[in-house]
Amino acid sequence: MNITENQQTGKASISFHRPVFIQSCASVAGKKEGEGPLGSCFDQVWEDPMFGMDTWEAAESTMQKQAAFLAIQKAGLSPQDLRMVFAGDLLAQTTASSFGIADMGIPFYGLFGACSTMGESLSLGSMAVAAGYGDHVLCATSSHFASAEKEFRFPLGYGNQRPLSATWTVTGSGACILSSAPPTEKSTVMPSPLRTGKSCIQITGITTGTLVDYGFKDSMNMGACMAPAACHTICQNLLDFHRKPSDYDQIITGDLGDVGQHILLDLLLKENIDIQSRHQDCGLLIFDNPSQDTHSGGSGCGCAATVLAAYILPKLLSGAWKKVLFVPTGALLSKTTFNEGDSIPGIAHGVVLEHVSL
């Protein structure tokens, strides 16, 4: 079969006729994340926010490197087995990813999609695998509360007040290994594959997001900036694949938080689409907002990535969910454009994840 035949679906989607399997995944989180509802699900929780390093940026690089190595080890691979890596973060020139991945010697693509970067990484990685350009591809992202605050808002020592619409940047990193071959069963060679018996997980399609700008300029209300983009991508996915919300067990956005979730549900209802009974948001899953004082919820590249690896993929593997639309969301905030008074456009990428039996 011609692997490119009929893969383009609708206006912005791709349906993969050649299987794209998630062979393994890993998550590394900080102390606050470990104290949240998903604390027991992460592979590693570090008490030290510096991760043994001298700067916040180096700490984030170390965290992403650790998540990548864990995913590689779980798949029974070495860095030399990987054809390429798609990785990104929130820092200027994606330094957390480039410094974190540098020692591995893997061909590297650095990405920036703000908090949607895990969706961007999985989309590009799955396209590369489906087209035959790589047998094993690493997808990874990270964020760190302190490095993000320093980059986009205020230094921690300034002690600025945070409005209730603000989200809390997740200190965490998630990584996945994609492959054209299904993971083999658990063994000494592959110690922790994403496989149970004959069950595993495939990426069966993607919907590439479109930039949506409603004119919001408030850097302390990222949920409002991203919700219109999430609405657009979800609508486009349903249209392109000729599906309805009930075709998915869950539709999970990246980090809209409490404010953004309400806006998303309202916007979709205006399109006669009701996902309230099957919608979850990673930013609301990773923290217990009232007790952890995270205001609107979690955010950051590491938010969607860690929740995917620690919670969503295990649920799919167990068969509790059969099909999930994973929609990481990003606010494309720039220090320069923000200070010049420009608005903050949003982006969201859709990834269709399915439980399959071999």
Image (spheres, grey):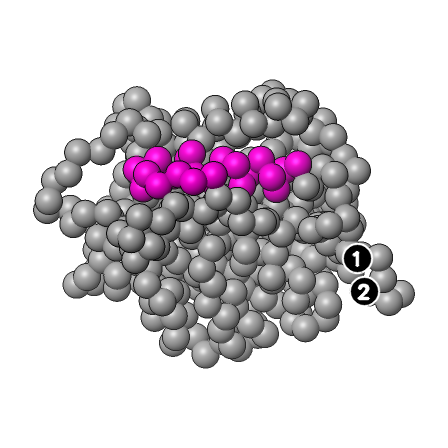
| Residue 161, horizontal then vertical, whole percent | 17, 34
What amino acid type should be assigned to the residue bearing mark 1? Gln
Asked whether 234 falls inside the magenta stretch, the response is yes
Q: Quadrant of residue 313?
A: top right
What secondary structure is the stretch in magenta mostly built from? helix
**Viewer-proximal residue, 303 or 33?**
303
Q: Is residue 143 visible?
A: no
User: At which x and y percent is residue 285?
Assistant: 44, 32
Q: Is 280 on the left or on the right of 239, as rendered?
A: left
The image quadrant of residue 356 is: top right
Per the model, the C-alpha gap separating discs 2 and 1 is 6 Å
Say which residue appears at 44% left-offset and 56% top-offset.
141
Q: What residue appears at the point 61 percent right and 46 percent down from the top-left corner?
A: 350
Identify the mark at residue 7; answer none if there is no mark.
1
Q: Nearer the viewer, residue 148 or 203?
A: 148
Q: Which residues are magenta?
A: 214-235
At a point 42% along the width and 34% down the height, the residue shown is 224
**Residue 78 position within the rendered picture, expressed as x and y whole percent measured from the top left:** 51, 72
Q: Determine the image quadrant of residue 327.
A: top right
* Residue bearing mark 2: 4
Q: Position of residue 102 (x, y in %)?
A: 39, 75
Q: Amino acid at mark 2?
A: Thr
Up/down of 345 relative to 181, above or below: above
Answer yes or no: do the residues labelled 2 and 1 have beta carbons within 8 Å? yes
- Identified at 40% across, 46% down, the residue is 344
Determine crowd level at label 1: few under 14, some 14-19, many 20+ residues with C-alpha closer than 10 A: some
Nearest to the observer: residue 30 or residue 350: 350
Q: Is residue 221 left or right of residue 137?
A: left
Name the residue furthest right: 1
The question of residue 72 being in magenta is answered with no
Disc 1 is placed on an element classified as: loop
Q: What secondary structure is marked by label 2?
A: loop
